[in-house]
Image: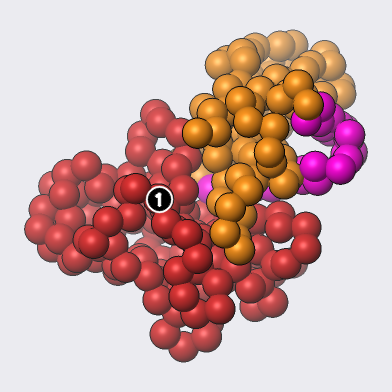
Chain colours: A red, B orange
Amino acid sequence: EPEVTQTPSHQVTQMGQEVILRCVPISNHLYFYWYRQILGQKVEFLVSFYNNEISEKSEIFDDQFSVERPDGSNFTLKIRSTKLEDSAMYFCAGGGSGRNEQFFGPGTRLTVL
Amino acid sequence: KQEVTQIPAALSVPEGENLVLNCSFTDSAIYNLQWFRQDPGKGLTSLLLIQSSQREQTSGRLNASLDKSSGRSTLYIAASQPGDSATYLCAVHVVGGSARQLTFGSGTQLTVLP
């Protein structure tokens, strides 16, 4: 059964550095999402991406964040200048049209020091 | 703004018991509701999706119900097993845009004792 994959599983970075989190969605999915979960808190929506552009974004997704799907398979989340409060688990998800069930990857744990 | 609440926050039961997890949401304008399982430090596994026009959905020992008008959903787990121990998350698909962002509850941490 196809799965969403994410790399790396754990990323440690210094405050102010740029990070890129990578995801390979399931091939027939059309909608792509990033969510994050700060330790002990709810899973929060960041951004949705459809037809090669951002469809919706939350208040969290400010100018420090960007997403792209550079080659039709990978889906990336870039944080330009990381802050301590960006430490969280970041989940990539995807879904097809119709039922809109979302399938999540295993997550990347980002630790900002 | 949509708020999703899950009760109880934690639940511990002996193996073999049937149990019910509760989820409530404040805005009934949802497309669907999805139940997930999350193991410690891991990703989210989709368990069931209930579309807004449905009242329930079943998968194996799991049965989820949806009462959209009252803003409630329940997840029923029959004959619980230690392997069911995990955090169970409820999420609603919010109306808006061309995609379907999910709003999550805090989860119910389930422990099934052997």
Q: Is residue B23 above or below residue A101?
A: above
Q: Pick whichever, B44 or B53, lies toward us.
A: B53
Within the magenta stretch, is there residue B49? Answer: yes
Q: Is residue A107 above or below residue B32?
A: below
Q: Position of residue A102 (x, y in %)?
A: 65, 55
Q: Position of residue B43 (x, y in %)?
A: 54, 48
Residue where numbered disc 1 is placed: A58
Label 1 is found on which chain of the structure?
A
**Residue at x 65%, y 63% (from the top left corner):** A95
B4 relative to A71 in the view: left or right: right
Q: Position of residue B64 (x, y in %)?
A: 82, 32
**Residue at x 34%, y 48% (from the top left corner):** A59
Q: Is residue B111 above or below residue B27?
A: above
**Residue at x 54%, y 66% (from the top left corner):** A32
Predominant SS of the magenta segment = strand
Within the magenta stretch, is there residue A59? Answer: no
Viewer can see residue B100: yes
A102 relative to A40 in the view: left or right: right
B44 relative to B82 in the view: left or right: left
- Magenta residues span B43-68
